[in-house]
Image (cartoon, rainbow, N blue to C red):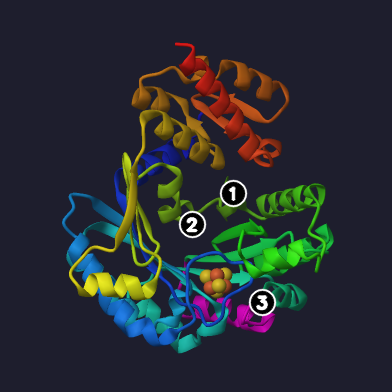
Amino acid sequence: MVTAADIHQEACMEKISKSAGLYLHIPFCKKKCPYCDFYSITDLSLIQPFVRALKKEMELSGNTTLHFDTIYIGGGTPSVLGPEEIFLLIDTARGQFDFLPDVEITLEINPGTVNMSGLKAYRDAGINRISIGVQSFETLNLEFLGRIHSERDAALAVNWARDAGFDNIGLDLIYGIPGQSPEAWLQDLKRAVEFEPEHFSCYMLTYEPGTPMEKKRQQCFFQPMSDRVEATLFETANDFLTTRGYEHYEISNFAKTELPSARSRHNQKYWSYSPYIGLGPSAHSFIEPERRWNCRSVKQYVDRIDSGKRPVEGNEVLTRQQQMMEWIYLGLRTGEGIHMNRFNKKFDVDFRSIYKGVITDLTEKGYIKTEENRCCLTRQGMLFLDSIASMLIHQHTENISHR
Ligand code: SF4
């Protein structure tokens, strides 16, 4: 049955997918965490030339017909920038791009880099959503992750953010830390919900190629968690947060059910195939059907902009098949799943008949459900997103090659 909430959510998604998002990548961190493969450097002396260059990149990129309703300042650790620099970036963005009223402006912060007055000043600078990289409230976990902050710093940062007037706060947590039991993860979650944030991102620890943590894993410094326990922890988060009033709206993301604005409007653009422009070193942009990305090195980025050039390093134009595959993969990540009618209309195909075999098989196994217009993963299916997406892609390739 289609409920009023479904209709409201559908209208929100329609609105989100029509407007664009602006992402600003701040490539600085006080210290690199050993598990992280996002691009950032620890030489903070480059902040000033970088901010100047990012402002210039906005001026070089503003010539677009897109209308924006989000700015996401991510990194790296954007909170190594002071409120004046954040204000300058928001102000420049507003001068260069066409924004709709009621823009969601998110700032990622690291609890080891903020204080009460700084948070107030970020709010005065125009930030209206804060994403706090807590990762865990357990000291041993924070040590294993090589974080620069303590459990106390994290708790203070969340309280200060609330006292500073933020009414849209997200906490990032990491689970799947070697040796972590489902009970210990549940304790971490219980501690986190005491702060009543509007949003949670719960990421499973992954070992990215080239990171110091992956090297340690290879050298058997620790025993990574088994798939079975990881699955239990995933279910623990799902069970606990959904009974505490949070909706599991994307594989790693939960938002307060009664507050539609608690979902990350900006991140929903990535999953709904909406346009976005990413500025700053290593940032990616997507305006259908083209994806483009900037060079990674801060020095190279600043040099290119200083010589009047755009810092774009590469691009790819997605074929129709690639677009279909991405649409499916991204749609399956979300609680709403793939909107089959929209898919059919967009690609002039019949979703149900192209993927009939796989859908029937996976529905029988309890991994996929199709309701009304939607095809989405069950909770069990979410554990196998990559394999399920591969099965659909395989069937797609077979069907197309036999035509
Ligand atoms: S603070 Fe964030 S971006 Fe920086 S190294 Fe750690 S996880 Fe990566």
Percent x, y of residue 123: 38, 77
Question: Badge 2: few (under 14), some or many (20 or more) residues near its Cα, within 10 Å?
Answer: many
Q: Is residue 145 left or right of residue 285?
A: right
Number of numbered discs present? 3
**Residue at 44%, 17% in the rendered image:** 350
Q: Secondary structure at mark 2?
A: helix
Q: Amino acid at mark 1?
A: Glu
Q: Is residue 223 left or right of residue 13?
A: right
State whether residue 322 appears in this view: yes
Disc number placed over residue 362 in the picture, else none? none
Q: Which residues are magenta?
A: 146-167
**Residue at 57%, 16% in the rendered image:** 356
Q: Nearer the viewer, residue 35 or 219?
A: 219
Q: Is residue 402 left or right of residue 245?
A: left
**Residue at 69%, 49% in the rendered image:** 238
| Contact flag, marks 3 and 1 (Cβ < 8 Å) | no
Q: Nearer the viewer, residue 8 or 149?
A: 149
Label 1 residue near ligand 1, CB within 8 Å: no
Q: Amino acid at mark 3?
A: Gly
Q: Which of pointers 3 and 1 lies earlier in the amino acid sequence? A: 3
State whether residue 1 appears in this view: no
Disc number placed over residue 262 in the picture, else none? 2
Q: Secondary structure at mark 1?
A: strand
**Residue at 27%, 54% in the rendered image:** 68
Residue highlighted by disc 1: 247
Label 3 residue near ligand 1, CB within 8 Å: yes
Percent x, y of residue 343: 41, 27
Q: Amino acid at mark 2?
A: Ala
Q: Which of pointers 2 and 3 lies earlier in the amino acid sequence? A: 3
Percent x, y of residue 361: 67, 20
Residue highlighted by disc 3: 146
